[in-house]
Image: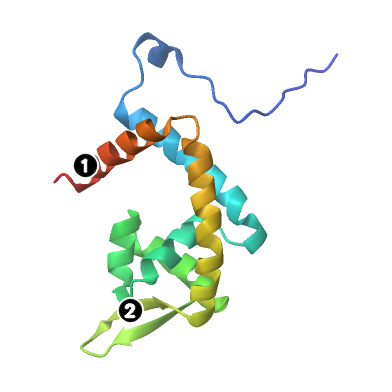
């Protein structure tokens, strides 16, 4: 009789991690994977992926260079180009040359990109709230405050 395997969203913790409770890096990675999954599901009706959403969020601040965007996302600048190309083709971003440094391209959201981002943001916020719902409101505030300290520490 053939075996069937059901796909689950939970992953088994490797034996080495069962002996020692997972630390910050492992937990952070697992939280991010779940956050990205939830965000992708929430944004799917808008035909938008989580990485595109974050690029739209970053671009909304105004003229930002492609290099700065890559740094903020932890991506190699050449990896970012294909994603930006797709967002530009869809009319959500535009790139323009910096008039003072022709080697640099500025990225900014278009009006259509602003409209899409404004429709996507509440979906992203609901996905985040759903992920945090396992914690009490007080624990949610503590977690977010602690995480903010970790990302601002240099």
- Of pointers 1 and 2, the one earlier in the residue sequence: 2
Pinpoint residue 10: horizontal percent, then vertical percent.
Answer: 57, 26
Q: Is residue 150 above or below residue 6?
A: below
User: Going by the picture, which residue comes out furthest to the top?
Assistant: 19
> Do we see residue 34 in this rendering?
no
Find disc 2 in the rendering and name its residue: 106
Q: Is residue 134 left or right of residue 69?
A: right
Find disc 1 in the rendering and name its residue: 149
Quarter of the image with the N terminus is: top right
Give residue 28's quadrant in the image. Answer: top left
Label 1 vs label 2: CA separation? 30 Å
Q: Nearer the viewer, residue 107 or 31?
A: 31
Total label count? 2
Element class at badge 1:
helix
Q: Nearer the viewer, residue 113 or 86?
A: 113
Pinpoint residue 115: horizontal percent, then vertical percent.
Answer: 53, 74
Q: Is residue 87 left or right of residue 73?
A: right
Pinpoint residue 92: horizontal percent, then vertical percent.
Answer: 51, 75
Q: Is residue 18 left or right of residue 6?
A: left
Residue occupying the point 33% across, 65% down: 69
Element class at badge 2:
strand
């Amino acid at each position: 009789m053939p075996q069937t395997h059901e796909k689950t969203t939970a992953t088994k913790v490797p034996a080495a991690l069962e002996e020692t409770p997972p630390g910050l890096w492992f937990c952070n990675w697992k939280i991010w994977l779940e956050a990205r999954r939830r965000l992708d599901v929430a944004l799917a009706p808008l035909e938008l992926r989580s990485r595109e959403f974050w690029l739209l969020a970053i671009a909304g601040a105004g003229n930002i260079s492609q290099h700065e965007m890559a740094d903020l996302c932890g991506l190699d600048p050449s990896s970012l180009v294909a994603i930006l190309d797709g967002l530009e083709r869809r009319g959500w971003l535009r790139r323009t040359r910096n008039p003072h440094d022709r080697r640099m391209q500025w990225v900014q959201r278009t009006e259509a990109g602003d409209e899409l981002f404004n429709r996507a943001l509440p979906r992203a916020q609901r996905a985040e709230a759903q992920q945090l719902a396992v914690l009490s409101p007080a624990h949610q505030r503590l977690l977010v405050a602690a995480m903010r300290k970790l990302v601002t520490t240099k």
